[in-house]
Amino acid sequence: MDYNAPSAYERLIAPRYAAIAEALVEAADVRAGEHVLELGAGTGLVTSMVAERVAPSGSLCATDLSRGMLELARERVDRADVSFVIADYSAQLPFLDDAFDVVVSGLTYVQNTGDALAEAARVLAPGGRSR
């Protein structure tokens, strides 16, 4: 399957991943008012869950390398407190140091590379959480 096939991903992968996504969001313990970065948002499954938790005073920045995936995520989660950014987590992230309270990453390869983990740590505020 082509990664840039968001409708196929949404139909075939997202339903099987729902329970894991719920467990990830629960483990991240996202709270209202926090600023959250999501790496590899895909079609917005985790995005929709996190968006509910940061409201009403927090924010969520959902990132993915695929424009098509993010467009589908934006359709799914159409909220003023959620932004969508095309970003490659294997490169330097386009965010300031210490910018987020929580960094989450679901079905991605962030955990497989030291550089990606270092970038996640760089944008995570002191005392922040990553899952």
Image (spheres, grey):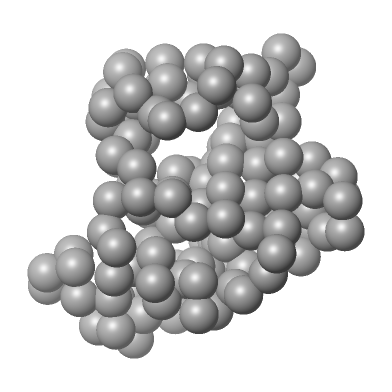
Image position, residue 49 (x, y; %): 67, 65
Q: Is residue 13 above or below residue 22?
A: below
Q: From the image, which quarter does the C terminus lie in? A: top right
Q: Is residue 34 left or right of residue 104?
A: right
127 up-or-down from 56: above or below: above
Outermost front residue: 80
Q: Nearer the viewer, residue 91 or 112?
A: 91
Left or right of residue 74: residue 92 = left
Image location of residue 45, percent across then percent down: 52, 69
Q: Position of residue 117 (x, y in %)?
A: 41, 22
Viewport quadrant of the N terminus: bottom left
Q: Is residue 67 above or below residue 89?
A: below
Q: What count of labels does the image hold? A: 0
Residue 47, given in percent of the width and then of the height, sits at: 57, 61
Residue drawn at 83 percent across, 59 percent down: 55
Q: Is residue 26 visible?
A: no
Name the residue rendered at 19%, 68% in the picture: 4
Residue drawn 66% across the image and 30% down it = 100
Residue 111 occupies which quadrant of the picture? top left
On the rendered structure, is 70 left or right of 9? right
Q: Residue at x 41, y 76 (%)?
A: 72
Looking at the picture, does residue 45 appear above or below residue 35?
Answer: below
The answer to whether any part of residue 58 appears in the image is yes
- Residue 83 lies in what quarter of the image? bottom right
Which quadrant of the figure has residue 113? Answer: top left
